[in-house]
Image (cartoon, grey):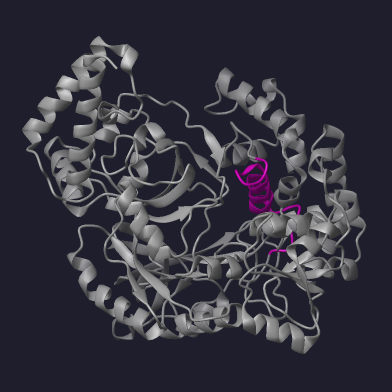
């Protein structure tokens, strides 16, 4: 290494260390002036000697990259959301559930829940290679150019880090920086930003990374994800992450009971107001990572974690009117139109009233002063009425009897809370809603086609259901409002490309009531084609994993309607994927069909996730608990003694990892 290259490397090493001390440890070891002088020296030398360019250099943090379109990429490990709890009883119920599923003493880590924008950082050989937003949990946008400008995100790690891993956290905007940004905006006559969370989230999608570099964002990390990380507990993972150079909040603590968890919650419910960032609760996790693996996941959340949300902020305001919305399934949702009021950093003008029973229960009337809060600090809801301020001539609310859009008489099925408009094919909001669902990101993901354009196409009479999209021509859409030639090309091209969307997503896109993403995957995997699902009896459907009677009835109803059969036949003719591809079916068998299998312990040849995939690929069903219906248990090392006792008591066979792998060969 020559003298110039050595000097550049020395400057980089020194600046990285100063950066870590200041932004991660909050312990500056050099003045801002001296840091800037050294940074400018490094910039000048790198410009003069481009042959020594390094993507992890401290000079790369100043930004300058302009990203027009952020690349959407899948998460290697899904980003789940957390179940929420709001009381001691919720946490105790959670503890009861998990104690039934795992053996041994359970310890909990308690961490503050920071209110920011979720991010997943991927490191290979100690270098940051990806920074992906949460998105829908399965895929997100790679915003690495913007993330590199955040000083508390290490571009190069130190210590004994694994070869490859993901680390998850929140991008936050400290109150001090947020206030300063707003002061500057007000000074130049701009509207101030609403709240730190939304500002942090919006920063990630700015096209010019040099603009992001001007914002005092921070990245707080809390979860390591990957294989063979050499870590056995959540607390150990937090400590390791600190050693590698990440900014990990120090408030985390270990608790040996739910009572100790509640002490942590009580303390921070008061002291959170002293923190430099927004927090909205506490995340409680099972500390032992092997126990986490045993507990696994539901369709949406890890069973081993729970978010306790601090009590939401409440305000009172006047209810000006009640209007009624029609959803894509025909469900009617009453909406409270409120006198605008500030609540948890946003202006609230509307709140859901849910259904007729809720209105009757709270005796909500137009003109009332009502108490409003954000449920989980996200969705505004009305808690009650200030009866002392009720107008003298107030009249009880009469729930509507006919659809506000098509005037069809509403129906309400026994046991259901909501009223429905039964005019499936003639009610415009239902038609528009179904098509909007069809084109949405998790469904057909049709680029160039948004919700407003769908409404415009329906209102102009160009489409009346989602199969009509495939008949649209460029000449038909160009005359539409705000539709330029390039937009029309993108729309037609996006519709054409949607024919490649896999079958399980097409099934979800059809909008069958109660068939969400998870159910669609189960049905697609079991039946392999739309024709097989259409011909399945209610009894057969109920026998599919996680399909109950309500879902089965809804599926049968959908395929019994002639209009839907007509639409599906059109989709077939246009070449939309209505069966599993050969690639998806590759490696799938029915060797374990009908088997209900419990997986327990630590495995040598394959990982737990690989083992579960083998079960599903061979037609088996995975269960998290042992019962008389369990076919057998695949046991690795450290299988819990209580699981073993229960298996012996019920006469359930226990097989080894090797024996199981022989079954699938």
Q: Is residue 299 visible?
A: yes
Q: Which residue is more in the foreground, 315 or 390?
A: 315
> Can you say whether 395 is above or below 539 in the image?
below
Q: Is residue 561 visible?
A: no
Q: Which residue is more in the foreground, 475 or 574?
A: 574
Furthest-top residue in this view: 48
Q: Picture coordinates of residue 122 (x, y %)?
A: 46, 42
**Residues in magenta?**
421-444
Which corner quadrant holds the N terminus? top left
The reply to whether the magenta stretch includes residue 434 is: yes
Identify the residue at horizontal 64%, vertical 50% (top origin).
433
Q: Quadrant of residue 403?
A: bottom right
Q: Picture coordinates of residue 151 (x, y %)?
A: 26, 40
Identify the residue at horizontal 69%, vertical 64% (top origin).
421
Q: Picture coordinates of residue 509 (x, y %)?
A: 70, 48
- For the image shown, how many numbered marks are present on the structure? 0
Identify the residue at horizontal 61%, vertical 44% (top origin).
440
User: Would residue 567 be found to the left or right of residue 442 on screen?
Assistant: right
The reply to whether the magenta stretch includes residue 195 is: no
Identify the residue at horizontal 19%, vertical 33% (top origin).
14
Furthest-front residue in this view: 1
Q: Which residue is more in the foreground, 374 or 318?
A: 374
User: Would residue 389 be found to the left or right of residue 95 on screen?
Assistant: left
Furthest-bottom residue in this view: 649
Q: Picture coordinates of residue 351 (x, y %)?
A: 43, 65
Q: Quadrant of residue 612?
A: bottom right
> Can you say whether 240 is above or below 460 in the image?
below
User: Would residue 294 be found to the left or right of residue 82 on screen?
Assistant: right
Q: Quadrant of residue 606?
A: bottom right
> Can you say whether 37 is above or below 505 in the image?
above
């Amino acid at each position: 290494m020559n003298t110039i290259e050595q000097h550049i490397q020395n400057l980089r090493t020194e600046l990285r260390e100063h950066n870590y001390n200041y932004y991660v440890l909050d312990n500056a070891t050099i003045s801002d002036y001296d840091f800037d002088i050294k940074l400018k020296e490094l910039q000048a030398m790198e410009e003069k000697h481009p042959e020594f360019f390094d993507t992890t250099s401290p000079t790369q943090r100043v930004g300058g990259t302009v990203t027009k379109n952020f690349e959407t990429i899948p998460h290697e490990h899904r980003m789940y959301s957390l179940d929420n709890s709001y009381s001691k009883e919720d946490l105790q119920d959670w503890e009861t559930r998990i104690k039934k599923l795992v053996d041994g003493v359970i310890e909990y880590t308690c961490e503050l829940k920071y209110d920011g924008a979720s991010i997943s950082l991927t490191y290979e050989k100690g270098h940051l290679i990806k920074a992906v937003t949460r998105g829908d949990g399965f895929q997100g946008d790679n915003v690495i150019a913007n993330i590199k400008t955040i000083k508390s995100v290490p571009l190069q790690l130190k210590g004994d880090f694994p070869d490859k891993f993901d680390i998850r956290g929140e991008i936050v905007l400290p109150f001090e920086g947020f206030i300063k940004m707003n002061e500057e905006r007000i000074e130049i006559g701009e509207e101030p930003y609403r709240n730190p969370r939304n500002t942090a989230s919006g920063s990630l999608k700015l096209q010019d990374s040099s603009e992001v570099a001007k914002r005092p964002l921070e990245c707080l990390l809390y979860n390591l994800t990957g294989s063979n990380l050499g870590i056995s507990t959540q607390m150990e993972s937090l400590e390791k992450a600190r050693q590698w150079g990440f900014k990990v909040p120090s408030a985390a603590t270990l608790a040996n009971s739910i009572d100790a968890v509640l002490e942590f919650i009580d303390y921070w419910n008061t002291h959170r107001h002293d923190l430099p960032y927004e927090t909205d609760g506490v995340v409680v996790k099972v500390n032992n990572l092997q126990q986490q693996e045993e507990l696994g996941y539901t369709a949406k959340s890890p069973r081993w974690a729970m978010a306790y949300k601090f009590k939401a902020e409440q305000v009172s305001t006047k209810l000006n009117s009640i209007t009624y919305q029609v959803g894509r399934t025909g469900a009617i949702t009453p909406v409270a139109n409120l006198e605008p009021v500030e609540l948890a950093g946003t202006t609230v003008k509307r709140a859901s009233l849910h259904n007729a029973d809720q209105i009757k229960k709270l005796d909500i009337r137009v003109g009332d002063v009502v108490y409003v809060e954000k449920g989980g600090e996200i969705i505004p809801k009305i808690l009650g009425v200030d009866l002392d301020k009720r107008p003298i001539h107030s009249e009880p609310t009469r729930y509507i009897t006919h659809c506000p859009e098509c005037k069809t008489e509403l129906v309400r099925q026994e046991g259901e809370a909501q009223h429905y408009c039964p005019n499936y094919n003639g009610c415009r909001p239902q038609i528009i809603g179904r098509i909007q669902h069809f084109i949405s990101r998790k469904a057909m993901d049709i680029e160039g086609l948004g919700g407003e354009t769908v409404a415009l196409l329906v209102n102009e009479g160009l489409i009346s259901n989602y199969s009509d999209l495939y008949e649209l021509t460029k000449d038909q859409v160009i005359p539409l409002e705000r539709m330029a030639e390039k937009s029309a090309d993108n729309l037609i091209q996006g519709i054409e490309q949607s024919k490649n969307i896999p079958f399980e997503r097409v099934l979800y896109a059809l909008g069958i009531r109660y068939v969400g993403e998870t159910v669609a995957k189960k049905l697609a995997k079991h039946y392999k084609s739309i024709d097989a699902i259409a011909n399945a009896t209610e009894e057969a459907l109920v026998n599919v994993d996680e399909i109950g009677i309500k879902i089965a009835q809804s599926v049968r109803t959908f395929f019994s309607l002639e209009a839907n059969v007509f639409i599906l036949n059109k989709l077939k003719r246009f070449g939309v994927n209505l069966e599993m591809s050969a690639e998806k079916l590759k490696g799938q068998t029915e060797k374990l069909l009908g088997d209900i299998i419990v997986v327990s312990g630590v495995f040598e040849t394959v990982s737990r996730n690989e083992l579960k995939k083998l079960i599903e690929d061979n037609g088996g069903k995975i269960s998290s608990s042992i019962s008389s219906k369990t076919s057998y248990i695949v046991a690795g090392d450290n299988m819990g003694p209580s699981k073993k006792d229960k298996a012996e008591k019920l006469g359930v066979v226990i097989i080894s990892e090797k024996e199981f792998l022989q079954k699938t060969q």
